[in-house]
Amino acid sequence: MQRKIGMIGAMDTKGTEFAFLKQEIERRGFGVYVFDTGVLGEPGVQPDVNRDCIAAEGGLTIDELIALGDRGKAMRVMAAGAAKVVSQAASRGEIQGLIGMGGTAGTAVASSAMRSLPIGFPKLIVSTVAAGNTRDYVGTKDIVMLPAVVDVSGINRISREIFTRAAGAICGMTESDVIPASDRKMIAASMFGNTTACVERAKGRLETDNLEVLVFHCTGVGGQTMESLADAGLLGGILDITTTEWADEIAGGVFAAGAERGDAAAKRGIPQVIVPGCVDMVNFHARATVPERYAGRKLYEWNPNITLMRTTPDENARIGRILAEKANASSGPAAFLLPLRGVSILDSPGQPFWDPAADEACFEAIRKHVKGHIPVYEMDVNINDPVFADRAADLLMEMMAGMPQAEKLA
């Protein structure tokens, strides 16, 4: 059966460009299923799902959108409608991949549709904003963004190259059959550069128990992605070694994951081991980007693009309380494991962020605010010591097996 690629965008203002893209996809033997999100004029490419249908799914008619004369409102309605119709088309098997093109508005609408699709479903956008901060467009999904280099406006020497390669890329993604996954239970582990040694060792230990470990880099999006998988019921356990995103959340760092970090595991009853890993640091970009209010704080340039700021005892106490309150909401087993000799590489004796008083503020807040049925284990080692990683992995495995925690780990 011929595979079809969904093509989404404004078929009125970008009709010429989409006609070329459609031709290139068809030249490779694929069918094209067109979603028209234009609101200004007649489409230059005949759609399979027209703008009237998409607008209606978004809550208004095209005539109402035109009468409003509000471009922002129109894009929000079309984005909402596109997410619904694309998701429905994919569920019915009408498309096996999705490609879009556009500027800021076109990217916003196409990416909204793509975020409605599952991870693994081929999705690509040729975008004029692909070289900037794409977090709001990509979210927690595997959306490929290809810089348009020039505006999506006509077929010229540059755009011809870009559009042709984009067609080849989405066709290649769509024709690539994925080898079926194993039936091993999936575990999520949170990691940062400063906890890599711990997580890698724990990962290896978990894998010997026939568990599949997904490691998430705690850059905000990483934590959000882990939450989305937990909320979807795809995880059998969480080894939350690195909770650093909370430091960024409370202090305005660049890697915050939002106030919902930790909610999904609690709501779903997923067994979780929680460690205050890397809560000694708030992340900023290059040193010049650190806010003026933090000029007197202890800073460390991790690399030319990342500057770390040591958290204070007050900030650590706030983080500890938040972690305890998130765990208290758990409908399943949860436990804390505290590394008393430091929560990161930099937070160890002789290193720049070593501050036992600040660490203790976090630990004490956890002890004080956590409910009595949630155990708090302490080890007089650094988070990256092998014995700590082994203990964390063993604790999670025993929780998942339903074994009495206090009895097994006393």
Image (cartoon, rainbow, N blue to C red):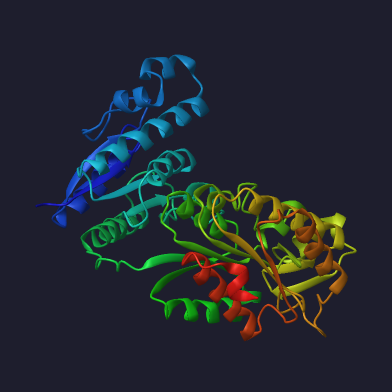
Residue 290 showing in the rendered view: no
**Looking at the rendering, which quadrant does residue 32 occupy?**
top left
Residue 306 showing in the rendered view: yes
The answer to whether residue 153 is above or below residue 161 is: above
Query: Nearest the camera: 124 or 323?
Result: 323
Give the residue at x 82% y 77%. Answer: 354
* Residue 74 percent across, percent down from the top left: 46, 26
* Residue 364 percent across, percent down from the top left: 81, 62
Q: Is residue 15 left or right of residue 212?
A: left
The answer to whether residue 150 is above or below residue 189 is: above
* Residue 61 percent across, percent down from the top left: 37, 18
**Looking at the rendering, which quadrant does residue 103 occupy?**
top left
Q: Is residue 205 left or right of residue 89?
A: right
* Residue 332 percent across, percent down from the top left: 54, 54
Give the residue at x 42% y 40%. Answer: 106
Give the residue at x 48% y 16%. Answer: 68
Query: Nearest the camera: 142 or 33?
Result: 142
Q: From the image, which quarter does the C terminus lie in?
A: bottom right
